Amino acid sequence: ETGSPIMFSPNYGAASSHIQTLMAEREDFLAVNRTQAIKIKALEETVRTLTAERDEALEENRACSLLVETLASSNDEKERTLEKLQSALRGLWGVQQAAQQKADEVSGLCKEGSDLLVSCQDLLEAAAPPKE
C-alpha cells in the first residue's frame, strides 16, 4: 500500500480546501437568501400598505361619486324650482299688465265720469234761477 502511486491516494488537503470553498459559497448563498427574504417581506408589506391605501382611495372615490350625484340631483331640483319661479313671475307680470290695463280703463272711465259730473253741475247751475 505504501507503494501505490500518489495519483490514486487521497489528498485530504485539497478536499478540505474544496469543502471550505463550498461552505463559503453556501454561507454566501444563505446570506443572499436572507437578504432576499427581507426584501420580499418588505415588498409584501409595501403591497399590503398600497392595497389598503387603494381600498381607502376607492371608498373615498365612491363617497365623492355619491356626493356628486346628490349635488347634481339637488342642482337639477333647484333649476326646476327656478324655472317654475320664472314661469310664475312671467304669469304674474302678465296679470299685473292686464290689471294695469284695466286700471287705466277704469281711470279713463272715472275721468269721463268726473267730466260728466262737472258738465252736469255746470248745466244745473246754468239752469237754476238766479239767487237774490
Image (cartoon, rainbow, N blue to C red):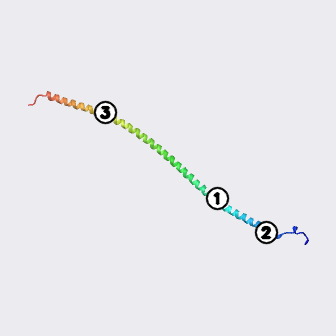
Residue matched to label 2? 17
81 up-or-down from 3: above or below:
above
Q: Amino acid at mark 2?
A: Ser
Q: Is residue 119 shown left or right of residue 71? A: left
Residue matched to label 3? 102
Q: Where is residue 123 shown, x and y percent of the image?
A: 17, 28
What residue is shown at x 38% (from left), y 39% (from top)? 89
Eye-nearest disc, 3 or 2: 2
Image quadrant occupied by the N terminus: bottom right
Q: Amino acid at mark 1?
A: Leu
Q: Is residue 41 shown left or right of residue 95? A: right
Q: CA distance from mark 3 to mark 2?
A: 124 Å
Q: CA distance from mark 2 to mark 1?
A: 39 Å
Residue matched to label 1? 43
Do residues under tags 1 and 3 come within 8 Å of each other at their CB atoms?
no
Q: Where is residue 127 shown, x and y percent of the image?
A: 14, 27
Q: Where is residue 115 shown, x and y percent of the image?
A: 22, 31
Of residues 70 and 48, which is closer to you in this image? 48
Q: Label 3: state its secondary structure.
A: helix
What residue is shown at x 56% (from left), y 53% (from top)? 57
Q: Label 2: state its secondary structure.
A: helix
Q: Is residue 52 shown left or right of residue 33? A: left
Q: Label 1: state its secondary structure.
A: helix
What residue is shown at x 49% (from left), y 44% (from top)? 73
Q: Residue furthest top?
A: 127
Q: Amino acid at mark 3?
A: Lys
Q: CA distance from mark 1 to mark 3?
A: 86 Å
Give the mark nearest the N terminus, 3 or 2. Answer: 2
What residue is shown at x 60% (from left), y 56% (from top)? 50
* Rendered image quadrant of residue 95: top left
Give the mark nearest the N terminus, 1 or 3. Answer: 1
